[in-house]
Image (cartoon, grey):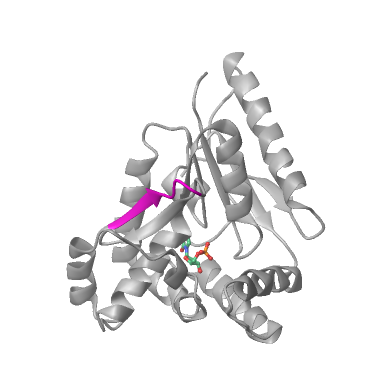
Amino acid sequence: MRKIVIAIDGYSSCGKSTTAKAVAAELGYAYIDSGAMYRGVTLYLLEHGIPFDDLPRIEQALQEMHITFKRNRKTGRNELCLDGVIREDEIRQMRISNSVSEVSVIPAVRHAMVAQQQRMGRKRGVVMDGRDIGTTVFPDAEVKIFMTADVLTRALRRQEELALKQEHVPVEDIVENLRKRDHLDSTRAESPLRRASDAVLLDTTHMMIDEQVDFVLERVSATLFSLAAGGWQGSEQK
Ligand code: DC
């Protein structure tokens, strides 16, 4: 069967990655968490003491760092590696969440990550989640979903995830972090977070994960059916 690209964009903590992972597993596609890559760059810059406004050093660092994913055989998940070492836990910490939007506005960082993401998806058969997948990375993605949810619902979900990793953060701090990131992500000059004109809106405020996954899988089935019948017309015009 023909393989397609599924782009899942939207605000932080709407359930994008949980949905994307489950959809990829169901279809036997690769799952790529593009946000993890920006988090990896942020961790690298912090660990090497590189200030976020030192562009020459950032450009040099981008040449030197290796951002890859490694499949965890036990969980079946792709884990982010920085220079060959799995750093999945560190990149999810609040200190990274608090800085990542500042790093992901830097054009050189975006260019490097977008080019790598495009290479990862060139054979299609991928589900990629992020902020600019349907608009910039794969404007020709056959299925595009734009996810959103009420900010308090998102903060409570995030708090639960952090608590599982023994990081206990007050919900107000998370709401503040989410609002700040939403603002920075949607107002930056370089590929801001926005809904592609041909993306389907999915509000997950009152939805369970299974419903979200079914929603996306239904879109995929409809698209594959339409492609097989020769009816699919195309994608967002840049
Ligand atoms: O999905 P996430 O919360 O792990 O993403 C972390 C940050 O990375 C988010 O605040 C914005 C940025 N990001 C981006 O700019 N473009 C993407 N495609 C994915 C994430």
Q: Quadrant of residue 217?
A: top right
Q: Where in the figure is residue 43, as x and y percent of width and height?
A: 36, 73
Q: Is residue 52 above or below residue 16?
A: below
| Residue at 32% from the left image edge and 80% from the top image edge | 46
The secondary structure that dominates the magenta segment is strand
* Residue sticking out furthest to the right: 206
| Residue at 48% from the left image edge and 36% from the top image edge | 140
Q: Is residue 56 above or below residue 215?
A: below
Q: Which residues are magenta?
A: 67-74
Q: Is residue 102 above or below residue 231?
A: below
- Asked whether residue 18 is drawn in magenta, I would say no
Q: Where in the figure is residue 82, as x and y percent of width and height?
A: 31, 63
Please tell me which residue lies in front, 71 or 126.
71
* Residue sticking out furthest to the front: 74
| Residue at 37% from the left image edge and 66% from the top image edge | 40
Q: Where in the figure is residue 232, as x and y percent of width and height?
A: 59, 23
Q: Is residue 192 above or below residue 234?
A: below
* Residue sticking out furthest to the top: 229
Please tell me which residue lies in front, 65 or 70.
70
Q: Is residue 60 left or right of residue 40?
A: left
Q: Where in the figure is residue 26, as x and y percent of width and height?
A: 61, 35
Asked whether the viewer can see residue 198, the reply is no
| Residue at 54% from the left image edge and 61% from the top image edge | 193
Asked whether the viewer can see residue 228, the reply is yes
- Asked whether residue 70 is drawn in magenta, I would say yes
